[in-house]
């Protein structure tokens, strides 16, 4: 698409839409940011967003991390579930001597 007559046609149409709607300071690239933001806000992982946008490094994608404040809550909950699950298993486990006898 890029570098072809289709791209040129698209670019001209895009410019016409922006002029007609009187939108300024907006590029097609802005839609990539919107897509990434909405994906993170809807719960997609940063790794998924990285792959979707084709970022070469996760550090590029991390600029969207602030849009997912619940990701830390989910991580803490997962660790807590693991810890308390292990604690419950240890509390209900029979001693080794009793299990062998």
Image (cartoon, rainbow, N blue to C red):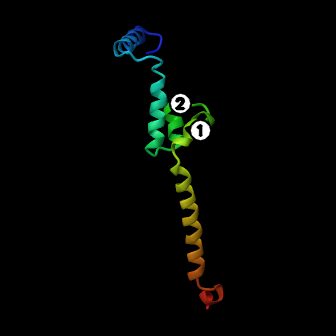
Figure check: 54 above or below 82 = above
Relative image position of residue 33 (x, y in whole percent):
49, 30
Q: Residue furthest bottom?
A: 101
Give how far across and how far down residue 22 sits, in percent.
Answer: 38, 15
Q: Is residue 59 left or right of residue 53?
A: right
Residue at image location 40% in from the left, 12% down from the top: 15
Residue found 48% across the figure and 18% down from its top: 25
Q: Which residue is mark 1?
A: 62
In front of the other: 64 or 60: 64
Does label 2 or label 1 sit earlier along the sequence? 2
- Dividing the picture into quadrants, the one containing residue 34 is top left
Q: Quadrant of residue 92?
A: bottom right
Location of residue 80 with respect to 89 vertically, above or below: above
Give SS at disc 1.
helix
Classed neighbour count for the residue bearing mark 2: other residues with Cα under 10 Å, few (<14), some (14–19), many (≥20): few
Is 83 left, or right, of 49 in this rendering? right
Residue drawn where x is 51% and y is 51% of the image? 70
Report the quarter where the C terminus lies.
bottom right
Residue 20 located left or right of residue 93: left
Q: Tell how many labels.
A: 2
Q: Residue furthest right?
A: 97
Q: Quadrant of residue 7?
A: top left
The residue to which callout 2 is attached is: 54
Res. 20 mark: none
Q: How far, Cα to Cα, is label 2 from label 1?
A: 13 Å
Position in image of residue 89 (x %, y %): 56, 76
Say which of marks 2 and 1 sits in front: 1
């Amino acid at each position: 698409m890029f570098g072809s007559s289709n791209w040129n046609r698209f670019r001209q149409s895009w410019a016409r839409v922006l002029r007609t709607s009187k939108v300024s300071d907006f590029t097609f690239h802005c839609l990539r940011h919107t897509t990434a933001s909405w994906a993170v806000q809807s719960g997609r992982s940063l790794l998924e967003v990285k792959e979707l946008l084709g970022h070469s490094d996760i550090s590029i994608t991390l600029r969207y991390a602030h849009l997912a404040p619940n990701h830390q809550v989910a991580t803490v909950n997962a660790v807590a579930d693991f810890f308390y699950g292990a604690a419950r298993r240890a509390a209900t486990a029979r001693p080794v001597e009793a299990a062998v006898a």
